[in-house]
Amino acid sequence: MNAHRKQLIALAHPVYLSLLASVASGVINTVWVSRLGGGAVAAVAVATNTENVLLGVALVFASGTTVLVAHGRGARDPAAVRAAVRGGWALCGLVTPVVAAGGFLLRGQLAGLVLGGHDGGALGLATAYFAISLPGTAVFFAQQLVDGILKGTGDTRTPMRLALLANGLILVCDPVLIHLHGVRGAAASTVLCRTVALTAGLRVLRRNALLRTAAAAPPAGPARAALQRTLATGLPMSADFTVRQSGALVLVAIVARLGVTAVAAYAIAYKIMYVATMAFYAVRQAAAIHTAHTRGTGQDERRGIGRQAVLVSGTLGLAASALFAVTAPWIMAAFGAGGAVAHQGALFLRCVGPYLLLMACFIALGGVFEGSGGAPALLRVTVLGTAVQLPLAHALCGLGLPGVCLALALSMAVQCAAVAVLLRRLGQRARARASLVRAG
């Protein structure tokens, strides 16, 4: 097996399980809270969607730290690793109080903004949930950073174990705390169980050999400079995620033109697709870590890593497309869909294959850009793709959900073509530098 491919798979599969476990906490909460009625379910759904937005904020310091730690590890530079960790904690410490305290103080307004059309009962429940979950953002952010540091050291298994620990505890604590305290109990369960996982993660950080060596190294410049490097590295990654999330929300509004049945089918099918798309993002994270590490050693292996990332992720995309095409009716039935909703959802899953395959390739290549400092260029491609996707979806939604699938595939084809051009330019620059070195 190709060495790059072997390393990508080794890094990616724990990341994938970790991502699945993270989604599981929202599912677990929803299952238990559903016994309290529709208002409680709406409150938890709002909180889950809000956390997705906050994840984009966390990526600024978590992903930025991952890339910088991996680069320092490749360069065998303990001072650079120490600076990366300091920058991550400094940025996290700057952002967390603003989000946690500001969110708590504005919890009622936030709930009203998202649930403006719901009755007062749902609004009150969402506000009560936010009263605990938003201060708990401090735990969520710290855990994201701990995971990011560990991934940078090449350890993707510990974040997976921590995610499994947190969600295993949530599975046990949810029924008890929800029975005692309702919606507040659901929020408290999530925060408490994540706190246990965070405590375990901090202990692992103290035992990590690379980080212990880095802690003993002399500081590589002031903390402010380290913070700025983390911000410059992580901000484009966060913006990329935010643009995609925003595009997905607007796409739901476009699908809504097709009616309630289409929205329900699309919502279920899109959640089913997470099983595949999380695998692509796992490969992306692995590619970012491996690329940053190899560049730290002084090697430029972007083309080789990119090819293997596309091979691994593309294979997963092709397998997912085939699986969805064959089993779509049974998958929709397993999620409780029936009648017209099941029919339209199955149609969407059978038409979405080309988009999934193209997305798998693009997402995987994104990791190479992130790991090599090319995230700003990748962000421009994402903005371009979203700008193409939404008008196309609006124009083609007259064809129903197959038209939406076509718009998704065409916009992703544009993004793949743009990334191919960028990669070709990178290759030309690398060959030009090599020629200059040989001439010198």
Image (spheres, rainbow, N blue to C red):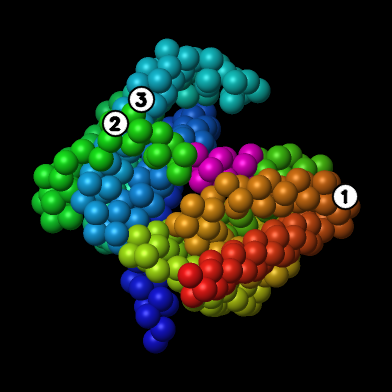
What's the CA distance linking mark 2 and mark 3?
A: 12 Å
Hey, what amino acid is under mark 3?
Leu
Hey, what amino acid is under mark 2?
Ala
Graded by Cα atoms within 10 Å as few (under 14), some (14 to 19) or many (20 or more), the crowding at tag 3 reads few
> Which contiguous range is marked in magenta?
235-246
> How far across and down, in percent of the image, does residue 167 sit?
30, 49
- Which residue position is annotated with label 2? 223
> How far across and down, in percent of the image, does residue 119 sit?
59, 20
Question: Comparing marks 1 and 3, which lies closer to the viewer?
Answer: 3
| Along the viewing direction, whichever of 326 and 143 lies nearer the viewer | 143
- Which residue position is annotated with label 1? 395
Q: Is residue 79 magenta?
A: no
Hey, what amino acid is under mark 1?
Ala
SS class, disc 1: helix
Between disc 1 and disc 3, whose residue precedes? 3
Between disc 1 and disc 2, whose residue precedes? 2
| Along the viewing direction, whichever of 354 and 274 lies nearer the viewer | 354
| Along the viewing direction, whichever of 417 and 253 lies nearer the viewer | 417
What's the CA distance linking mark 1 and mark 2?
A: 50 Å
Between disc 2 and disc 3, whose residue precedes? 3
| Along the viewing direction, whichever of 366 and 340 lies nearer the viewer | 366
Query: Residue 318 appears in which quarter of the rendering?
Result: bottom right
> How far across and down, in percent of the image, does residue 76 sit?
24, 59
Numbered label attached to residue 94: 3
Q: Report whether 112 appears left or right of 294.
A: right
Graded by Cα atoms within 10 Å as few (under 14), some (14 to 19) or many (20 or more), the crowding at tag 1 reads some
**Residue at image x 69%, y 64%?**
421
Q: Is residue 240 magenta?
A: yes
SS class, disc 2: helix
